[in-house]
Image (cartoon, grey):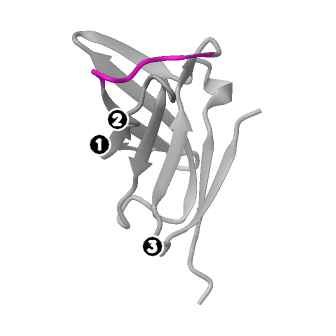
Amino acid sequence: MAEKIYMASADAERTVTFDLLLDGVEQDLGSATVECHMRNTRTGVVTTVTDVTPDPDQVTYPGRCVTEFTAAQLLAGTYTLEWESTISTNITTYPGDADERPLLVVRAEAA
């Protein structure tokens, strides 16, 4: 079952820390360029988030990265998240199984 992450559209903290696994194994992202693709589950529109930073200590935390969303990206709705890493010319998508993609649920601010 996919993990659910909850945020409000006006949250000041707009980051998600996630460990990227391939077949259950962490991947060293030390030399990778990583981006996040968030797909609106209702409209199908995909937004690419390029502010993804691999943890600088990939020995202790292999595969860990921090994704920072902008206010414009956090519109109310539900999104599936997947990350794409590029090392040299090799592109890998995480998670590999679509059923394991986390859901980002963004609600409108209550007040």
Residue nearest the viewer, comparing 70 with 31: 31
Q: Which label sits in the foreground, 2 or 3? A: 3
Residue nearest the viewer, comparing 90 with 41: 90
Residue at 54%, 38% in the rendered image: 18
Q: Main secondary structure of the magenta part?
A: loop
Query: Which is nearer the N-term, disc 1 or disc 2?
Result: 2
What span is colored magenta in the figure?
A: 25-32
The quadrant of the image that shows the C terminus is: bottom right
Q: Which quadrant holds residue 2? A: top right
Q: CA distance from mark 1 to mark 2?
A: 5 Å
Q: Residue furthest left?
A: 88
Amino acid type indicated by mark 3? Ala
Q: CA distance from mark 2 to mark 3?
A: 21 Å
What residue did someone put label 1 on?
50
Q: Are marks 1 and 2 in contact (CB under 8 Å)?
A: yes
Does the magenta-highlighted stretch encompass residue 20?
no
Residue 62, placed above or below residue 81? above
Query: Which is nearer the N-term, disc 2 or disc 3?
Result: 3
Residue at 45%, 20% in the rendered image: 93
Q: Which quadrant holds residue 23? A: top right
Q: CA distance from mark 3 to mark 1?
A: 19 Å
Residue at 50%, 72% in the rendered image: 11
Residue 22 placed where, x, y %?
Answer: 56, 15
Amino acid type indicated by mark 2? Glu
The numbered disc on residue 13 is: none
Residue 8, placed above or below residue 102? below
Query: Disc 1 on helix, strand or loop?
Result: loop
